[in-house]
Amino acid sequence: MTAETSAQARVDLTACDREPIHILGTLQPHGFLLAAEGDDLRVVQASANVPDGPDRSGAALRGQPLAANFPEIAAALAEYRAALPREGAIYLRTLTLDTRDGSRRYDLAAHRSGELIVAELEETEGEATGGLDALAPRLNAFVDGLHAATTVEVLCSLLAADIRHVTGFDRALVYRFDRDWHGTVVAEDGNGVLPSYLDLRFPASDIPVQARELYRRNRLRIIPDAGYAPVPVVPERTPSSGRPLDLSHSILRSVSPVHVEYMRNMGTMASMSVSILVDGALWGLVSCHNQTPRRVPLQARNACDFLSRVFALQLAAKERGVLAEERVALGTIRGRLLAHMAREESFLDGLLNQPDDTLALVQATGAALVGREQCRLIGVTPSADEVRGLYAWLSARHAGEEVFETDALGEVYPPAAAFAASASGVLAISISQKYAHYVIWFRPEVVRTVRWGGDPHKAATADPAGGPERLHPRKSFEIWKETLQGRSAPWTLPQVEAARDLRASVLGIVLRRAEEMASLSEELQRSNKELEAFSYSVSHDLRAPFRHIVGYSELLRTREGERLSENGRRYVETIIEAAHSAGTLVDNLLTFSQMGRNALNRVTGDMNVLVEEVRRKVLRDLEPDRQVRWQVSSLGRVHADPVMLRLAVENLLSNAVKYTRGKPEAMIEVGREPDRDGEAVFFVRDNGVGFDMAYVGKLFGVFQRLHRAEEFEGTGIGLANVRRIIERHGGRTWAEGVLGRGATFYFTLPAQGPR
């Protein structure tokens, strides 16, 4: 293959695509052409074979009004001039013209070419045909057969049989294009004179781009004799425009020499093609061949055009019906998936928990839900690492595309060759407008053997003048088999639409939930502001009464203490102690309420320096006989508000000292774990009383205490302050403990790179 590929690389593969077959400037000789312009239909160009009349010279027509030499043609053009379409030629009538060789009958057709009116006269053979009326029974039977046909294959067979009957050709083929413009013979009718091409495939290069465009614009083409000598159009260029005459809609237009050679290599001397257009696009062709030259009257060709148009309408209706049934079935599946997604807290769980429907939505065998931090697989898929590689490629090469689909992934993403067995076909939708998140469906490789009508690689021959090699039509049409690998079954239009609709629904769910969260966030912010204001007001207003209680109680103890009984003095001490505790609680509440209002003033600092400052402060309040062993590891640098972070660390270290009070030697460790997911993870660990993990959910709540006040003093607000401070920095808090064996408190902050 490498040698052949190398040879092909040297060939000008687009030579056929660039051939100007619509302006070749020549005609086939079974008729003649007159191009006229202006109100008087003055002849400006004509084919060189215009017949001489009894009193006129065909070569002397140019520059004269058409009516001066061909009044019959001029009258017909004048009658139908306003009705001539911009696209395509129409049959006007059959005329008898007097020539020097006697009277001849011609079928007159006309079309527009820019500002010109082009008349083409095709000489008829024998008596005039009866027109469409003579073919009416056959046409009616054909229409009835189309209505009764149950499949597209049956429709195509009916068309091939009827067109061969009308034309009398040796073979009639229905040739369908795929999306790569390769063609396959899907139906055939023949008399056995020519070999069968049924089910054979022909490469797109056999019918190049500009030829396909001409087939779309000019639905019917005939070559009665491949051995014809072309007739030139004179002059070569239109005098008024200086351009060659555009013969795109001509029924007599000469064909490319490459095509004539192609016919000869096929063993056919006459051919006719009728284009099959579905919704204006070229669906396929009816291609007719004869071993010997053969003329088909214009009326019969028009009947074939009529048959093909009726066929195209029925074909479109059947294909739309099949697509509609598939859309309904897939729509039902999509509805079920949406119902499941709506019930789940995370809509992705609605897809993961319904794997059968997720795969059936597009008839896939595997799927993946993949983003930057997750890769969830369903069914038969490549490995997680292979899927992540595909995800990275999609994110880089197809970012912004709503839907990506291919049935030959290895051709656009070479690493896919390694997992072709599970994912030769891929259909992917982006489910986020901001981040790269995809749902990707997979289809396995389907190895097929294709029967080509000859080697699809055109042969090249060297230019004797030393120019580049040029492509020539193939000489052999013997069956050439090729095994196609690395391809899956193609995705259908309804399946791609179903994926696109699911994407729109997912984005709708995300948007609706985002709006709900925004509304809830606004409500929470408003409630929090009201609570903070209330807490601040209550705390501020309560401080003065508690100060008065403490002050007057102390005055009562010092000035009137001797007059009080022992119980009275004990009551006063209890009042003072309770008032102090209440004041501390109010101060802590005031601090807690201020946490939500104060702006963060982030700076980058050394975490070890901050911990050491807090440790010294805690040690100043420590009982002289306490034994505490500290272990502080390297903590690195953080970007945070130093005042708030100091308060959080102080609460954690103070708690560690307090809850190790009963230990002969307290052990308090402050450390940092390896960063994960962009977070720096810190911890404070002690060997104190610990706690029961069954109550861990209460630890960070306001006024939540797991130990009695008689055992350990406190207000139950310290850890709530810690959580609020850390969350305001974008971090998290949690704790682990064992009753009687100590506890570990964790908090995270955004990581600052290398420590």
Image (cartoon, rainbow, N blue to C red):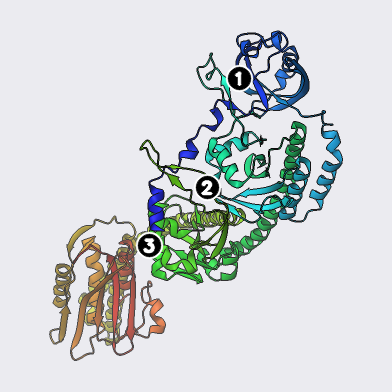
Q: Position of residue 665 (x, y in %)?
A: 18, 89
Name the residue tied to disc 3: 535
Indicate which disc, 1 or 3, sits on the residue closer to the N terminus: 1
Q: Nearer the viewer, mark 1 or mark 3?
A: 1
Q: Nearer the viewer, residue 266 or 92?
A: 266
- Please, what is the three-letter code of the amino acid marked with disc 2? Arg
In the displayed orientation, state which residue is furthest to the bottom.
664
User: Badge 2 is on which residue?
Assistant: 474
Task: Identify which residue, 396 or 216, lies in the foreground.
Answer: 216
Q: Position of residue 169 (x, y in %)?
A: 73, 43
Q: Amino acid at mark 1?
A: Ala
Left or right of residue 77, residue 706 in this image: left
| Gap between marks 1 and 2 measured at Cα | 32 Å
Rendered residue at 61%/63% (across/down) = 339
Q: CA distance from mark 1 to mark 3?
A: 105 Å
Q: Are marks 1 and 3 in contact (CB under 8 Å)?
A: no
The disc labelled 3 sits on which kind of residue?
Ser
For the C terminus, the quadrant is: bottom left
Q: Is residue 573 above or below residue 291?
A: below
Q: Secondary structure at mark 2?
A: loop
- What residue do we see at 21% from left, 62% from top? 642
Q: Residue furthest front?
A: 101
- Using the image, tell me which numbered label, if any, was put on residue 48: 1
